[in-house]
Image (spheres, grey):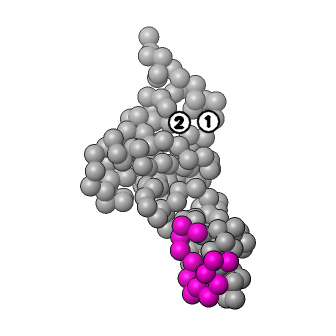
Amino acid sequence: MASSAGWVAGIAVLAGLSAVSDNALAATAPPAAVCRPGVTDDRLMPLPAALADRARMVFQLAMPDVLIRKTTVYRCLDGKTLLCTTGANLACGKANTARDLPGVVNWCHDNPQSDTVPMFATGHDTIYSWRCTNGRASIVKTVEAVDARGFLARNWKDAGG
């Protein structure tokens, strides 16, 4: 008789679930098998143990698997497994494309002629660089590309395989 984990994984595939993250299949699957072909799922999911070495290679990480799994998430895009590792300036959630940010407004109020606005005021997920002119916030330019699903493109890597 098959194990219950194998049975659950089989049901998940038959039921058409977009990603399999917390079962035996995800724990042992190659990157291509974690996300179903053609499926997109924008949820940020915990990294399966089987992808820790892949994340280490893709992001050139020098840390134990336990830390890689705590700091790396995955999502599915058209059946591909994409990885993102968080860090001091690395946001894995959707990009902030807002053209009016309260933190920038406050910074410019206190620093009316500032040529730059620090990330602690803008947030690490904004796609713009900002400045202050006479106390008013303004966008200097777009500095981050956004992928088709609204995530910061440079932070997400294809797991391959």
Residue 145: quadrant of the picture? bottom right
Graded by Cα atoms within 10 Å as few (under 14), some (14 to 19) or many (20 or more), the crowding at tag 1 reads: some
Q: Which residue is identified by label 2?
A: 20
Residue at 41% of width from left, 44% of height from top? 70
Q: Is residue 161 magenta?
A: no
Query: Magenta stretch mostly in which secondary structure?
Result: loop
Residue 49 position, x and y percent, is 37, 38
Q: Is residue 141 left or right of residue 26?
A: right
Q: Secondary structure at mark 2?
A: loop
Residue 116 position, x and y percent, is 55, 82
Q: Secondary structure at mark 1?
A: loop
Residue 156 position, x and y percent, is 49, 60
Residue at 62% of width from left, 50% of height from top? 42
Q: Which residues are magenta?
A: 109-121
Q: Nearer the viewer, residue 6 or 87?
A: 87
Residues under numbered marks 2 and 1 in contact, where contact means CB atoms less than 8 Å apart: yes
Mark 1 residue type: Leu
Most extreme residue toward the front is: 110
Residue 19: quadrant of the picture? top right
Residue 90 visible, this angle: yes
Q: Which mark is residue 139?
A: none
Mark 2 residue type: Val
Distance from the alpha carbon under mark 2 to that under mark 1: 7 Å
Residue 137 position, x and y percent, is 69, 80
Q: Is residue 113 magenta?
A: yes
Residue 158 visible, this angle: no
Residue at 48% of width from left, 17% of height from top? 4
Q: Which residue is identified by label 1?
A: 17
